[in-house]
């Protein structure tokens, strides 16, 4: 069902373009052109975020922080096996996907831990990555408050995820 | 961001010198490589979607989305510049429909458009938080992974995921409403300005709170 969605939507757009006598080639090229400055603007920010993530992981800070925080998370209902996932998710989509796979193989796909990890993975976003990309070209550097709010909101959904997976 | 970045860089470098000095530079370069491959991927997605969106705009269909979502936008962001409203409507539609390729280009466009006007800081913050706590209806990538790993009922995580995303978005929206000062973009017409003032008056307790919170956070963080 969902595989039809985008093609059908595009078809409607293309048909409308013909009806309205829009020059499709010219218009499409204008849009695509904006990808070049976009690439130049996001790359430096992505490099910073990814270097940060790599160092965070390889230096052992990530494990240290997750060891330190897991009792706190435990109190809020997040199992200690999932602490790392909760911490990595805001930084890296690939990193958290790798962790998710690891949890699947370690504890079984249908276990509470795995289902819970899925919900955590699916319900939160890579906040820092989004911040880097969305604000790459922006003048506003007032990002701290929105980032903190997003992180708190994501954390709430993680706590909720662990709770709801026990019931459903 | 500068504080976090500086702290992580310093501490991790110090730790690596302690236990594995050779891994330091190579892991930084590995990070850079990942960033490059992601940038390439993003540019292709961006180019294709922006091409289609240009058509969407030229045909006037974008206005249809914008009109449908206008009440939602008004509730979330307050009054918006027209063009920003169009892009933001497309971004939010794409978010809800789970078209992840489309959300980012439209999001960037929206922010660039909002930035052209003064008094849009609140809208920018709200818009970012909504995107960062995304409303996703079908977690398709997770379900695919579960299927390949042999889960008995791969779809049983849909409902909890939808509920959990809703929780994060609602919490995010509420926090923005509470802590970020509503500056409000004012359209030129005096009519709108009047109603804007009345609105701001109602939120004075929040306004004060927001001001100090923002002030502190910004001085410290940037």
Image (cartoon, coloured by chain):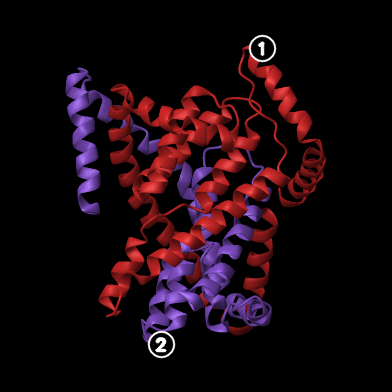
Chain colours: A purple, B red
Return the residue nearer the eye: A153 or A27: A153
B167 left or right of B206? left
The label number, if any, that marks residue B190 in the structure image: 1
User: Is residue A71 visible to us here?
Assistant: yes
A21 left or right of A42? left
The quadrant where residue A80 appears = bottom right
Q: Are marks 2 and 1 in contact (CB under 8 Å)?
A: no
The quadrant of the picture occupied by the N terminus of chain B is bottom right
Return the residue nearer the eye: A168 or B152: A168
Residue B216: % across, % down? 80, 48
Return the residue nearer the eye: B44 or A101: A101
- Residue at (27% x, 25% y) in the render: A27
- Residue at (43% x, 40% y) in the render: B91
- As helix, strand or loop, the secondary structure at mark 1 comes to helix
Q: Nearer the viewer, mark 2 or mark 1?
A: 1
The quadrant where residue B137 appears = bottom left
User: Is residue A125 visible to us here?
Assistant: no
**Marks 2 and 1 on same chain:** no
Letter of the chain that mark 1 sits on in the rendering: B
Residue A20: % across, % down? 22, 18
Q: Is residue B116 above or below residue A59?
A: above
- Residue at (58% x, 52% y) in the render: B170
Mark 2 is surrounded, within 10 Å at the Cα level, by few (under 14), some (14 to 19) or many (20 or more) other residues, namely few
The quadrant where residue B65 appears = top left
Letter of the chain that mark 2 sits on in the rendering: A
Return the residue nearer the eye: A48 or B58: B58
The label number, if any, that marks residue A155 in the structure image: none
Mark 1 is surrounded, within 10 Å at the Cα level, by few (under 14), some (14 to 19) or many (20 or more) other residues, namely few
Q: CA distance from mark 2 to mark 1?
A: 63 Å
- As helix, strand or loop, the secondary structure at mark 2 comes to helix
- The residue tagged 2 is A106
Residue B27: % across, % down? 49, 70
């Amino acid at each position: 069902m969902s595989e039809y969605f985008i093609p059908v939507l595009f078809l409607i757009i293309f048909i409308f373009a013909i009806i309205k006598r829009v020059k499709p080639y010219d218009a499409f090229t204008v849009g695509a052109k904006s990808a070049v400055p976009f690439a130049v603007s996001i790359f430096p920010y992505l490099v910073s975020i990814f270097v940060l993530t790599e160092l965070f992981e390889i230096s052992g800070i990530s494990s240290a922080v997750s060891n330190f925080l897991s009792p706190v998370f435990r109190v809020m209902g997040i199992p200690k096996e999932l602490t790392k996932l909760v911490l990595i998710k805001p930084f890296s989509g690939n990193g958290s996907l790798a962790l998710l796979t690891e949890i699947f193989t370690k504890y079984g796909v249908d276990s509470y831990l795995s289902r819970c990890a899925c919900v955590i993975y699916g319900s939160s976003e890579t906040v820092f990555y989004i911040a880097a990309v969305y604000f790459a070209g922006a003048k506003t550097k007032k990002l701290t408050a929105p980032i903190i709010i997003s992180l708190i909101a994501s954390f709430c959904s993680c706590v909720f995820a662990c709770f709801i997976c026990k019931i459903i | 961001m500068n504080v976090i970045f500086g702290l992580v860089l310093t501490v991790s470098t110090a730790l690596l010198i302690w236990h594995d000095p050779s891994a330091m530079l190579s892991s930084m370069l590995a990070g850079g490589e990942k960033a490059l491959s992601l940038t390439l991927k993003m540019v292709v997605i961006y180019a294709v979607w922006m091409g289609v969106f240009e058509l969407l705009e030229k045909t006037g269909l974008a206005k249809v989305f914008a009109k449908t979502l206008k009440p939602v936008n008004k509730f979330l962001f307050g009054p918006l510049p027209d063009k920003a409203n169009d892009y933001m409507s497309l971004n939010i539609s794409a978010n809800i429909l789970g078209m992840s390729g489309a959300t980012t280009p439209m999001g960037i466009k929206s922010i660039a458009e909002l930035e052209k006007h003064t008094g849009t800081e609140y809208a920018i913050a709200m818009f970012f938080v909504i995107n960062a706590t995304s409303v996703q209806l079908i977690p398709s990538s997770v379900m695919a992974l579960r299927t390949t790993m042999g889960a008995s009922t791969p779809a049983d995580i849909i409902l909890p995921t939808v509920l959990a995303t809703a929780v994060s978005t609602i919490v995010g929206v509420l926090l923005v409403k509470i802590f970020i000062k509503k500056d409000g973009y004012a359209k030129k017409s005096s009519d709108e300005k009047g109603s804007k003032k009345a609105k701001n008056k109602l939120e004075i307790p929040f306004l004060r709170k927001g001001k100090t919170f923002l002030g502190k956070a910004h001085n410290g963080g940037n």
